[in-house]
Image (spheres, rainbow, N blue to C red):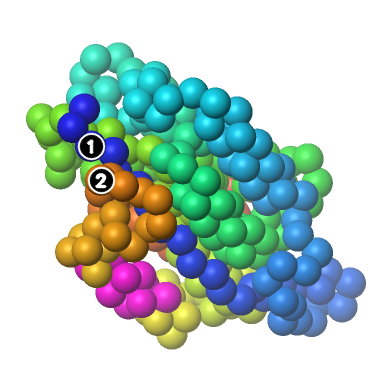
Amino acid sequence: MSRLNFEESAEGPRYTPEPESGRRVREPVFNNGAWPVLVLVGAIVGGYALQSRVDVNVIAAAFAFTPDALGTGRWWTLVSSLFVHGNWPHALMNAAFILAFGTPVARYFGLGAAGGLWFLAFYLACGVLATLPFAVIHSGEAVALMGASGAASGLMGAAARLIAGQGTPGPILSRPVLAFGAAWVIVNLIMAVIGAAMIPGAGDGAIGWEAHLAGFAAGVLLIGLAGRLARRG
């Protein structure tokens, strides 16, 4: 592998419905964090604490996703790559990203055991769908993708629709979705040009901006269907 591809993060408000009265309320991002989100953040931060004891190239060789992974039977790296990072800033920024955008999504699925499992499944689905376009675009290249930002971008897209609907999925072409999407496209265009200079400590790594945009789109498109399936279950 000639380079690693790192990912970035962002923050935003969240909106949740009040079950007892049906009223919808706006809450600060970091108050009353949903437990599935806190578990996921703990897995990322705690996982990197363990990972940091091992050379990043060894971790990348074992767990990162490469464009030839599916052809060589390493399909499971579609998931494992979401839980390994290049350095502390990379891991912490993705943890903050997930904490900000994951909370409204987790509350939408519900904070029981079943809701927590649906939240995790949604997160992983966004991560996988974010990674596949990267494999197509970089087919035949010696690159490796690692980091949670593709999946976290999916949470961002889902949160945008929940903001539009004040706690339930609003229209795909709503103002929050278009605003978040436009801002994310601009940020990632800058990333594509500037690259690792945007991430402290990323060294010579490039940024997997393709995964960011694909993940956002996956979150926007999947949240409504995932919510309906979760309620049928």
Secondary structure mainly formed by the magenta segment: helix
**Quadrant of the rendered image containing residue 181:** bottom left
Residue 191 x/y as whole percent: 26, 63
- Number of the front mark, 2 or 1: 2
Q: Identify the secondary structure beneath mark 2.
A: loop
- Seen from the viewer's position, the closer of residues 6 and 177 is 6
Spatial separation of the CA atoms under disc 2 and disc 1:
7 Å
Classed neighbour count for the residue bearing mark 1: other residues with Cα under 10 Å, few (<14), some (14–19), many (≥20): some
Amino acid type, mark 1? Arg
**Quadrant of the rendered image containing residue 106:** bottom right
**The N terminus - image quarter:** top left
Residue 146 x/y as whole percent: 38, 38
Q: Which mark is residue 204?
A: 2
Question: Residue at the spot x=60%, y=28% of the render?
Answer: 50
Q: Which mark is residue 3?
A: 1
**The C terminus - image quarter:** top right
Residue 3 x/y as whole percent: 23, 37
Q: Is residue 141 visible?
A: yes
Question: Residue at the spot x=46%, y=61% of the render?
Answer: 9
Q: Is residue 136 above or below residue 109?
A: above
**Would residue 109 appear left or right of 67 to someone viewing this image?**
right
Q: Is residue 63 visible?
A: no
Q: Which residues are magenta?
A: 180-189
Q: Identify the secondary structure beneath mark 1.
A: strand
- Seen from the viewer's position, the closer of residues 80 and 231 is 80
Amino acid type, mark 2? Asp
